[in-house]
Image: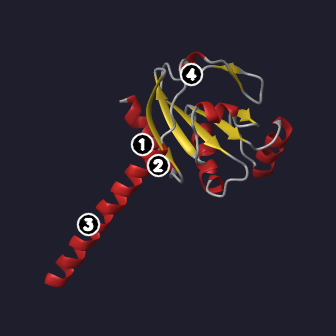
């Protein structure tokens, strides 16, 4: 019994260390919203003009910075697409993934339907100081409320959006 209790305590300490490291990495790699980002007009691949303030006015918006060449994005992007298909408030930014046609072809090959802002030269991502893909940013009422980098589960995204909207 004492051995089991010791293992439980060690497992708890390990989990707390991992949680602290993950939180520290998110803090260090957090993107920085550019001045007046909420008023910036963006155009999706479908030609729709949007603004982050408009999209985040009524419910929190998940902005997902990804790339077709990103290994981790291959696991995260289908979750983002699922969230979007279920009516989640999602906007994605394709970072240095080619021209509009190349991004559309990549999405078609993967059978993904996403609202995408193409950032072929990384200019928008540079304004946000995105240094890691994938990066997820939650915006509520025109303000950045959360961000994380790296792999995130479907339920992790849903929880972040729920938390931002409560």
Task: Determine which residue is flagged by label 2.
Answer: 155
Task: Determine which residue is flagged by label 1.
Answer: 159
User: Going from the N terminus, do you reach mark 4 or mark 2 first?
Assistant: 4
The residue located at (63%, 35%) in the rendering is 126
Judged left or right of residue 109, residue 70 is left
What SS does tag 2 mark? helix
Looking at the picture, how far across and down is residue 73, in whole percent? 63, 52
Between 39 and 123, which is closer to the camera in this rendering? 123
Number of other residues with Cα within 10 Å of mark 1, as a class: few under 14, some 14 to 19, many 20 or more:
few
User: Going from the N terminus, do you reach mark 4 or mark 3 first?
Assistant: 3
What numbered label is drawn on residue 4? none
Q: Kindly report which numbered mark, 1 or 3, lies closer to the viewer in this rendering.
A: 3
Judged left or right of residue 147, residue 128 is right
Q: Residue reaching furthest left?
A: 2
Query: Are circles 2 and 1 on residues that touch, CB within 8 Å?
Result: yes
Height in image: 15 above or below 47?
below
Q: CA distance from mark 2 to mark 3?
A: 24 Å
Looking at the picture, how far across and down is residue 122, in whole percent? 70, 37
What numbered label is drawn on residue 13? 3
What numbered label is drawn on residue 37? 4
Height in image: 79 above or below 71?
above
The residue located at (63%, 50%) in the rendering is 78
Number of other residues with Cα within 10 Å of mark 3, as a class: few under 14, some 14 to 19, many 20 or more:
few
The residue located at (77%, 28%) in the rendering is 46
Query: Are circles 1 and 4 on residues that touch, CB within 8 Å?
Result: no
Q: Quadrant of the N terminus?
A: bottom left
Looking at the picture, how far across and down is residue 69, in whole percent? 72, 53
Q: Decide if residue 1 is in sight here.
A: no
């Amino acid at each position: 019994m004492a051995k089991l209790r010791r293992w439980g305590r060690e497992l708890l300490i390990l989990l707390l260390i991992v949680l602290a490291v993950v939180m520290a990495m998110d803090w260090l790699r957090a993107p920085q919203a550019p001045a007046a980002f909420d008023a910036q007009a963006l155009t999706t691949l479908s030609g729709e003009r949007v603004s982050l303030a408009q999209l985040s006015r009524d419910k929190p918006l998940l902005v997902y910075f990804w790339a077709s060449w990103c290994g981790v994005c291959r696991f995260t992007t289908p979750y983002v697409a699922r969230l979007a298909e279920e009516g989640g408030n999602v906007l994605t930014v394709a970072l240095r993934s080619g021209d509009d046609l190349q991004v559309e072809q990549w999405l078609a090959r993967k059978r993904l339907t996403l609202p995408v802002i193409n950032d072929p030269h990384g200019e928008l991502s540079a304004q946000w100081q995105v240094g890691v893909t994938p990066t997820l940013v939650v915006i509520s009422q025109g303000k950045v409320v959360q961000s994380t980098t790296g792999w995130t589960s479907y339920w992790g995204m849903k929880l972040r959006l729920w938390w931002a909207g409560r």
